[in-house]
Amino acid sequence: MRAGDWEFRNRAMIFGMIMGCTFPLYAVDHQNSAAALANWFGSESNMDPDTIARLIFSVAAALLALAALLRTWASAYLHAKVVYAAEVKTAALVADGPYRRVRNPLYFANVLMAVAMGTLMSRSGAIIAIFAMWLFCYRLIRREEAELRVSQGERYEAYLRAVPRFWPSFRARIASAGTPARWADGFKAELWYWGFAASLASFAATLKLKWFFIILTASILLFWITTTILNKKDNKKAVGSE
């Protein structure tokens, strides 16, 4: 069940493919997932389905903003080149900030993103996107855990026993190591993710897809530029150290 080398190196592309391949499923399932839920809830509660749908989109936008905040918090304790590295970084174990409550906050946030973005997909598209995102994140986690077990030994085993793998604990499960959060770096690394949240928020506010796709496209381009620059710098350092 572990992700292979190619999958890990190209995880950003695969994340994009999961989202990009599930939106077009409107071709086989024409019903929007949020509209279907709103119609069902409206018939059960005698509420206006349009009002319910707008509320669903607003909640989805808030959920995606929460995911962006979680990723920013996590990235504030990691350097961006570690977050987007092409290989697992095993030199050090980060166990502060959100990592005291969940071992994989970045991947958990990605599943939240799939849930939020699923409100703009068809019913089948939303289900497939959420499941595929969870499954791929789980495969990546299994790979990272295997390599960290080898490099960190008993220290990492103790961390595994104390902190949940995927679902966050409301209380911190380990003591703080006293590492300061670098919030500026965190926001810089996850600016593209905040763009995703902004795109969904714009749709929730206007119910117009135009601004959603404009902001989303700009965010994807920003992500591509960021990861390309970081990977080039990482490759240069690797060549220089040989």
Image: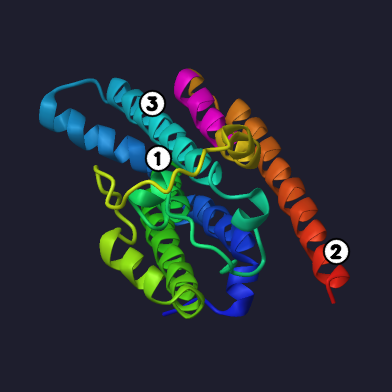
- Which mark's residue is nearer the viewer, 1 or 2? 2
Q: Which part of the image, by quadrant, shows the C terminus?
A: bottom right
Q: Which amino acid type is shown beneath numbered disc 1?
A: Thr
Q: Amino acid at mark 2?
A: Lys
Q: Nearer the viewer, residue 214 or 94?
A: 94
In-front residue for pair 11/157: 157
Is 160 colored magenta in this rendering? Answer: no
**Magenta segment, which residues?**
195-205
Q: Which residue is mark 1?
A: 119
**Percent of width and height locating residue 142:** 42, 73
Which of the labelled discs sits on residue 58, or is there none? 3
Is 200 one of the magenta-colored residues?
Answer: yes
Type of amino acid under label 3: Ser
Give the camera-side residue of 214 and 76.
76
For numbered disc 3, what is the local secondary structure?
helix
Query: Does label 1 or label 3 sit earlier along the sequence?
Result: 3
Q: In terms of secondary structure, what is the magenta stretch mainly? A: helix
**Rendered location of residue 187, percent (x, y):** 60, 34
Q: Is residue 30 visible?
A: no
> Mark 2 = which residue?
236
Front of the two marks 3 and 2: 2
In the image: residue 162, left or right of residue 104: left
Q: What separation in Å lies between label 3 and label 2 (alpha carbons)?
A: 43 Å
